[in-house]
Image (cartoon, rainbow, N blue to C red):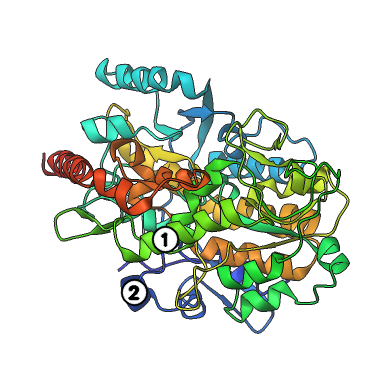
Amino acid sequence: MKRQGIIKRHIVTILLLSFILSISCGSDNDTAETGSGSEAAVTTAVENTDGEIEFIADNLPELDYEGTEINWLCGDYNDAYYDDIWAENLNGSLVNDSIFNARRAVEERLNITLNVERYQFVWAELSEYNAMVKSIVLSGDSTYDALVGYTLVPLIIEGGYFMNLADNEYLELDMPWWNQSANELMPDQGNIQFITGDATLSLIKHSLCMFFNQDLLDSYQITENLYDVVRAGDWTLDYMERLITDTYSDLNGNQQYDKDDRYGLTFGDTNKYRMLPAAMNVDMYTKTSDGYELTFIGERTNDVFTRLQELVNNNVNVRVAASDQSNDEVIDSFGGNKTSSIFVSGNAILSASLIGDASTILENSTFTLGMIPFPKYDENQDDYYTAAQRFAHIYIPATAEDSGRSGAVLEAWASECYRSVMPTYFETNLKTRYATDSDMAEMFDLLRANLCVEFGTVFYSQLGLNCDTFKNLSNSSWNFASETEKLRTSTEAQLEVLTAALNSWQND
């Protein structure tokens, strides 16, 4: 067994313990293996008698690559990924400078020069991005040591384009800087085609949360402390519905529900609906001994969907999500994302949005902002969960010149980000610059600790029933039971083909 080195850094708050945990989905099996958050924290960090947090160091040996140029290709869909892994210069922005310093630290440590080539594209150009990566590998081009950015699911399924990361001599995928739920997606854990985690900020920045307007709560004489409600485990759909009762107001007096009125709850756009299965702890697909089985169709999922459908469409205090992201009910945020203009203008108590939207909201509003998880479905749900709207996938192409070197650089980069970039993003950029108090800071930690990467989200384009099914919440007449039953046979067939393709690649 390798001996884990320890790096000590002084951190002023014990809240940091929770965000350096290995991220996992909170199933019963996970709980049996890893224990609760407080128990798992012992395996990754402890506070010593001097008030220091001891960070786990990676186990890389001393390596000298003699000035080798390392090239990464960033598939920067909607400008969502590049700035999270590359900073050209120091510019005074704390997060930018931490990314720059992380790169320089890795370059000095391994004696390399790291370059990141940016390939920008939008949805209509997605197929071109996949075709470009495919042509690079098929031509034997060894330019790129790693690919970081938008998902390459078609190439994962086709197989043969990426290295098996589980076999890499330098990658230790059970370390806290790698997301464990992503690692567990493949049917065979001995073969992993992509990874994600602290090597990029995109995973946490794109995760679903619930912002609230404390000033509006005060004006409605709502005295509950929402942070205490979350801590007590009582933040449920029932509680939220009671909270927003009678909060709608026809501000413009036209007797119509429109964007100029006041609401209890808004959504950034319909993409926020696609993350609700994770928040409600819905198992879309359940892993078996040789693949996955469809578990999306069932009584609980039907109950969750219809309950949310009723909330969205028939509760006067809730504004249905904007389906057209170009309309004036949303404002541009980071990475091509949108947030609710109604909320930002101060006319909603709650809004389902992304963690990374905090900066956009704070910069465009004047009210006191708070943040909590999306509520549990009911009191029987064991914890609060979240999922990312999108996140960077990390691959090593099959044509990489030296896969071991590629893995060493990725491991050094991810572990460095875990120790420096992530603390800066949380402690300085979010918890200090944007967070209004220590309670909101604690919520960032809670969300990161319960962040799930799911099969039905990663492979949604290959399966008829997936996270996008929840976008139908906006359609008040869409019947979950009957409509999903129509897709059962075709989805099970798609799942069989998908599982066979993944297993075929793994058994080559």
For badge 1, the amino acid type reads Met
Residue depicted at x 57% and y 32%: 82
Q: Earlier in the sequence, mark 1 or mark 2?
A: 2
For badge 2, the amino acid type reads Asp
Q: Report the number of discs.
A: 2
Instruction: Read off the residue under disc 1.
Output: 175
The answer to whether residue 219 shows anywhere in this view is yes
User: Which is more toward the observer, 107 or 150?
Assistant: 150
Q: How far across and down, in percent of the image, does residue 399 sit?
A: 28, 26
User: Which is more toward the observer, 465 or 200?
Assistant: 465
Residue depicted at x 80% and y 76%: 223
Residue depicted at x 76% and y 45%: 342
Q: Quadrant of the C terminus?
A: top left
Q: How far across and down, in percent of the image, does residue 13 sit?
A: 70, 72
Verify CB contact (< 8 Å) between mark 1 and mark 2.
Answer: no
477 lies above or below 314 = above
Q: How far across and down, in percent of the image, does residue 337 sit?
A: 62, 37
218 lies above or below 249 = below
Location of residue 420 (image quadrant): bottom right
Which mark lies nearer to you, 1 or 2?
2
Residue depicted at x 38% and y 57%: 181
Q: Secondary structure at mark 2?
A: helix
Q: Residue furthest bottom?
A: 49
The answer to whether residue 24 shows anywhere in this view is no
292 lies above or below 86 = below
Q: Which mark is residue 28?
A: 2
Q: How far across and down, in percent of the image, does residue 40 sit?
A: 46, 75
Q: Secondary structure at mark 1?
A: loop
User: Which is more toward the observer, 428 or 56?
Assistant: 428
